[in-house]
Every structure is written in structure tokens, then in C-alpha cells.
Amino acid sequence: MAIKTDLNTECITKDEGFTEPETLIFSGQLIISENAPLTPIYQLNRELACKVQRNMAIIFESVQFNETINPESKVIRRRKTSQDLYYLVHLRDPALQDNLPTYYITAASPGTLGNIQLDISSTNHKNEEFRAMLNADKSAADILLFNRNTQQLLFDIKPKWQGGQYQWIDMNGVKVASESGTSEEPKLHIEVPLQQQQRDVLVALWILRLWHSIAERRESKREGESIFTNRRMVADTVEEPRQVAETVHP
């Protein structure tokens, strides 16, 4: 069921609504083309949160720019418009939300592919793998967001090697994209022509995967610090009982 949460692009196109391969860069709240860094293609309504204390949603939007020329002054006016495509969702405690996945996206616009859940198919933190499962007949307006009996594989997301950058492989086994860059400036290399809807959802899922990486890395660090602190407390108790006793009972 629905969960309560805090709530023409500059690419080269050809016939039948296909977009050409290109490299996209994610910076802050903007997704830009490496070939046109001053013109965003997509945007988020907020930055990715590294610490989630409640259910959180981020709006993923397409961005278009329209230019008009004043015939008298010859001044060019550039107008920016945006359209909501998907809601990116991170649940704080999915066990309390009717077994919904921790990370998923829901369709905000009729022109999108549908709701998609991001399943973790391997839990090795150095070699995590994901599966993006499409529910083509669903949208954010549905009470039942996902149906495991009818959903279909959209992408397998796997590292090229252990600890390496991710590759995106479609349902036919074709590699459609790969990741590179740094944590400060991640890049997505789209390697094959894609229909506009396919590219939109690919980029939205890429941002969702980055969000997973940011949030889970912080959680692992927090747990590691907690374990380290507990070990120090145990060691202090064994090696220096008087000091601990004096600390507890001054």
C-alpha cells in the first residue's frame, strides 16, 4: 500500500524517441551530460540523505529548456520547466510497512514505465548485487505498489569485478550502462541507444542505487564505531577495573 513519506532535454535524439549513448554526471541535486555540463537533464528536489530517521521520498524530475527570441530587441529568453517522473523512496523500517522493499521508486507520471523495487541479490558489502524489478501496471497512486507474481526483471546491477564499478544489464543480457567516477562526482555511461522512458528509469534507478550506497555506508560506519566502542569498554573493564569503577561511582 502507499506509504506516507516526507515529501525537451539537451540530449541528441533520433527517430522513434530513442536517445543516443552519452555520459551523465550526478552533482548535488542535478544530473547533467558530460557534453553539456551547464544544462541539467534531470534534477532532485533535495539532496540524497546519508542518515534516514524516518520514511523519506525524493522527487526525480526531468528538466527542459525552451528559448524564445524577442523579434524587436533580439533578446533570447530561456525558460526552464520540469516534470515529476518518479518518487525515490527509502523506508527506515520496511518490516513495519507490509514487507515493502527498503528502496524503491514509484511512477509519478503516466508516461513512465511503472513502479520498481530495488532488490539486493547479494549482501556482501564489497560485492553487492541488485535486481530492479518492474511492476508495469503500477503507479504511486495504487494502494498495492508491487505484485511479486507479475513483476518482471528490468535490470541486473552487478560489479564488473569484486569491489569494482557497477554494470547495468537488461532483461536480454545486454549491458546498457556502466558506472565510473568518484563518490563526489559519480558518472553513468549509457552505452546503447535507449527509448526515452527506458533512459528516464535507468537514471532514476542509478540515483536510487547511489542513495543506497551513501546511506548503507554511513550505517555500516556507525555500527563499526559502536562495536569498536563496546570493545574498548570491555577491555577497560577487564584491564582497569578500578578506573572504570571510579568513573561509574565517583
Image (cartoon, helix red, strand yellow):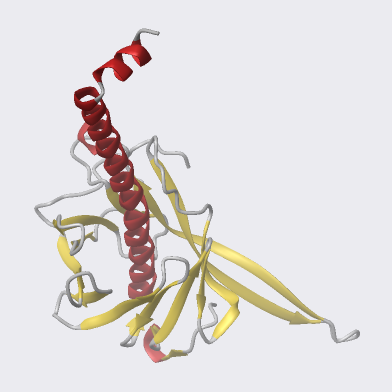
Classify the position of the N terminus by image quarter.
top left
Q: Which residue is nearer to you in this view: 185 or 104?
A: 185
Kindly indicate the quadrant of the structure image that contains residue 108: bottom left
Q: Position of residue 172 (x, y in %)?
A: 14, 80
Residue 211, relative to residue 65: is it above or below? Answer: above
Q: Position of residue 136 (x, y in %)?
A: 24, 61
Q: Which residue is nearer to you in this view: 161 or 132?
A: 161
Residue 139 visible to an observer of this rendering: no
Give the residue at the far left of this rendering: 149
Residue 144, relative to residue 42: is it above or below? Answer: above
Q: Position of residue 89 (x, y in %)?
A: 36, 48
Q: Residue at x 30, y 80 (%)?
A: 177
Total labels: the figure holds 0
Q: Residue at x 23, y 34 (%)?
A: 231
Q: Residue at x 48, y 42 (%)?
A: 7
Q: Residue at x 39, y 62 (%)?
A: 207
Classify the position of the C terminus by image quarter.
top left
Residue 173 visible to an observer of this rendering: yes
Report the side of 199 relative to 25 (left or right): left
Report the side of 77 relative to 214 (left or right): right
Kindly indicate the quadrant of the structure image that contains residue 126: bottom left
Q: Which residue is nearer to you in this view: 194 or 22?
A: 22
